Image (cartoon, helix red, strand yellow):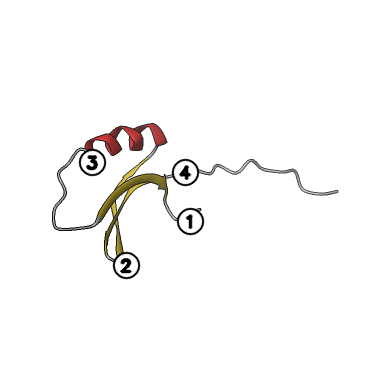
Amino acid sequence: MPAPLRKANMEIIWHILLTVCLGSTCLDQDVQWFESKAECDKMLTVYSEMPTDGDWDTVEYICKPVGSLNT
């Protein structure tokens, strides 16, 4: 008889990831971690309103699960 299935208690940790690009060179930096997507989205607004530091061509903040891949 097979063992009973257990529910996995998976907790998703969200983070704000900053990506800056100059020409064809891009750098990523982990900014802050959150326990919920709602918290991450709330702070994303704050970070997105900050003035950029440096002469980057693009500056992008996104909320995504820690360790996830871009699509």
Q: Nearer the viewer, mark 4 or mark 3?
A: 3
Pointer 2 or 4: first along the chain: 4
Marks 1 and 2: in contact by CB < 8 Å?
no
> Which circle's residue, 2 or 3, is located before the other in the chain?
2
Residue marked by disc 3 = 47
Question: In the displayed structure, does residue 38 sit left or right of residue 43?
Answer: right
Considering only order in the chain, which callout, 3 or 4, is on the residue closer to the N terminus? 4
Residue with the mark numbered 1:
69
Q: Amino acid at mark 3?
A: Tyr
Measured Cα–Cα span from mark 1 to mark 3: 21 Å
* Residue at image point 20% right, 38% down: 49
Could you give the CA–CA distance between mark 2 and mark 3, rounded to whole angstroms? 23 Å
Which residue is the site of mark 4? Answer: 12
Task: Report the front residue among 28 and 57.
Answer: 57
Q: Earlier in the sequence, mark 2 or mark 1?
A: 2
Q: Nearer the viewer, mark 2 or mark 3?
A: 2
**What residue is pinned by disc 2?**
24
Extreme right residue here?
1
Badge 2 element: loop
Mark 4 secondary-structure assignment: loop
At label 4, which amino acid type do we have? Ile
Helix, strand or loop for disc 3: helix
